[in-house]
Amino acid sequence: MNVLIIEDDKALARELGLYLHNERFHCDFARTGREASEKLFVNEYDFVLLDLGLPDQDGLQLLAEARQERNQQASIIILSARGTVDDRIKGLDLGADDYLAKPYSLLELVSRMQAIVRRKHGVTQDTLSFGPFVLNVSDRTLRHGEQEVPLTKKEFDLLHYLLLHRHKVLTRLQLSEHIWGSLISDSDDRDSNFIDVHVKNIRKKLTPYDPGDWIETVRGVGYRIKTTADA
């Protein structure tokens, strides 16, 4: 998922970014409130990790801003040395999903992020099912009965994201942002045609196990997972 790390401590931001990258998150960085505002306006994030002690702006003001426009659905976790009860309450009241006082455990942070994802999408276990297929998030496998369906990393991430939003139509832009990162990326892979290619490849891999078209094309919009009721 896409994460914006708003942290003025360059070394701490780098350490956090490397850890999250190893946990398969796409990370973007901002060291000031102004830089963060620009990125929040342009890009769409799944998580915003917010330090309150920014050099040019109170992080709580930025929190309110992040709840508007493109990022009103983002999950926001405050990471701050300001760890008093009053600070925690104020941050949560302004819309933060969680609050961790510095110094914090990176392992605990990721566990809390995963818990927020499960809660937000109503997932109570590490598996997601559609038709006869079961996607296991922990070991990153897709199975049909006892047989494993081989997927590339990007195919798995794309299918996982569609399953988390199984009742929504996701645009090619939303899918490409999730797979390749923010709009600021210069990667040619982010061309929408690459999403179509990946969807085609996933369909091709599912067909030998089940002929149903489980990824539905919504013409002119994007894709969604077909529910069992629609099948």
Image (spheres, rainbow, N blue to C red):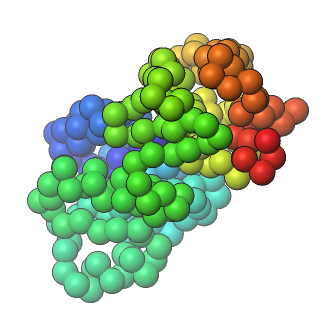
Q: Is residue 101 visible?
A: yes
Image point (44%, 52%), residue name: 47
Give the quadrant of residue 10.
top left
Task: Quarter of the image for the C terminus: give it.
Answer: top right
Q: Position of residue 36 (x, y in %)?
A: 44, 49
Q: Nearer the viewer, residue 87 or 100?
A: 100
The answer to whether residue 99 is left or right of residue 62 is: left
**Residue closest to the far left:** 103
The answer to whether residue 129 is left or right of residue 24 is: right
Q: Position of residue 103 (x, y in %)?
A: 11, 59
Is residue 138 shown above or below 57? above
Image point (19%, 49%), residue name: 106
Q: Nearer the viewer, residue 36 or 99?
A: 99
Give the quadrant of residue 133.
top right
The answer to whether residue 127 is left or right of residue 189 is: left
**Residue closest to the far front:** 146
Image point (45%, 28%), residue name: 146
Q: Position of residue 147 (x, y in %)?
A: 47, 23
Q: Nearer the viewer, residue 138 or 120?
A: 138
